[in-house]
Amino acid sequence: MNTHSSQLAEICAGLRRPEKMISPKYFYDERGSKLFDAITRLPEYYPTETELGIMLDNMDEIAARVGAQASLIEFGSGSSLKTRALLSQLIRLAVYVPVDISEEHLLESARKIRKEFPALEVLPVIADFTKPFELPNPKTMPLRNIVYFPGSTIGNFTHDTSLELLRVMYQEAGKDGALLIGVDLQKDAAIIERAYNDSAGITAEFNLNMLTHLNREFDFDFDVDAFSHSAHYDAAAGRMEIRLVSERDQQFSSANEEFQIAAGESILTEYSHKYTLDGFAEMAAQAGFDVAQVWVDEQQLFSVQYCVRRD
Ligand code: SAH
Ligand code: AVI
């Protein structure tokens, strides 16, 4: 089965569930990646600015942890915004491997990084990182692998999938490797909810763009105007829950399958989990990582964590 038909099968399986769902990876076509970049610049969306601040405030310690001649493998690199700050401080980085599903956006970001860092080998990998993928061979032999996973994208996965992903990262890091990860923290629900319900409506556009993406790439016929954005924080579960709510009874279809959705019924498009420091350390431990160092901002909104393999 090719990727396109297996992706369609995956999407239809999600739409057949008692609560309809579509994986958040389908947010990211070219427009979705641009809308995400616009989200990172919103005054309400604290994670990007806070994480970048933590990186800049602690760059000497972070660079020392990464060490010389490492290979930096970034999962879900997007525009590699925070990575630029890191790349400029690392000592003789062997290679930078940004991995992302959003093809045009990844290649454009890699082109910009090559221009800014002409001496650095940049080897982009277009892949769904939840499935097995091959890492390229760099010209310079790295002394160790650092898996970089910023942005708290780990929060977009369920507990079980996060664990699977951390285990893949454990393998990719290799024996002396490490994981440098951005992890959003639990806090006042109002701050979190505001970040996903911005006054400019960009997050709503980002959410609805998933349907436009599915219409174009997978021949769905969603009436995008008949859905609306919904984002609520479930404090007990420690997560944002983002949905598209149907404004009327309607049907939609792709290929030879038809789906019904009632007025008020929703499609779950994303979880965004927020962690406690202990909660994340426990999950990392289950995947074989020890959290060796944690950097947080003054208000403890967000954390950057350096995790080492326990072996
Ligand atoms: N790391 C950046 C971007 C985060 S947005 C930052 O911190 O700002 C999440 C990124 O992960 C997007 O670029 C998206 O295309 C990518 N992504 C999401 N799910 C993915 C998957 N399953 N495989 C590969 N890339 C994925
Ligand atoms: C990529 N990811 C960590 C973002 C988040 O905050 O969960 C995606 C996002 N969804 C809505 N706004 C931003």
Image (tube, rainbow, N blue to C red):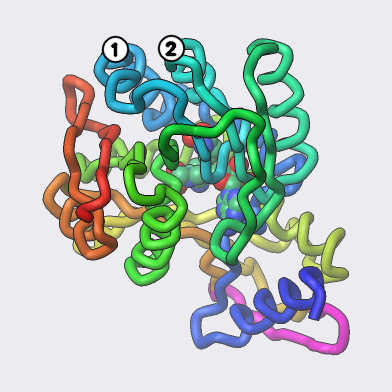
Q: Secondary structure at mark 2?
A: loop
**Quarter holding residue 54:** top left
Q: Which residue is mark 1?
A: 60
The magenta segment is: 253-265
Is residue 311 placed above or below 197 in the rendered structure?
Answer: below
Q: Estimate the x, y position of residue 48 in percent, counting from the top left.
A: 43, 28
Is residue 67 placed above or below 274 in the rendered structure?
Answer: above
Residue 239: tell me if it is visible. Answer: yes
Q: Nearer the viewer, residue 201 or 120?
A: 120
Q: In the image, is 298 to the left or to the right of 66?
A: left
Query: Residues under labels 2 and 1: Cα distance?
Result: 8 Å
Which quarter of the rendering shows the C terminus? bottom left
Q: Is residue 120 magenta?
A: no
Q: Residue at x 18, y 25 (%)?
A: 299
Q: Which residue is mark 2?
A: 89
Q: Estimate the x, y position of residue 150 in percent, counting from the top left.
A: 43, 37
Q: Is residue 259 magenta?
A: yes
Residue 157: tell me if it is visible. Answer: no
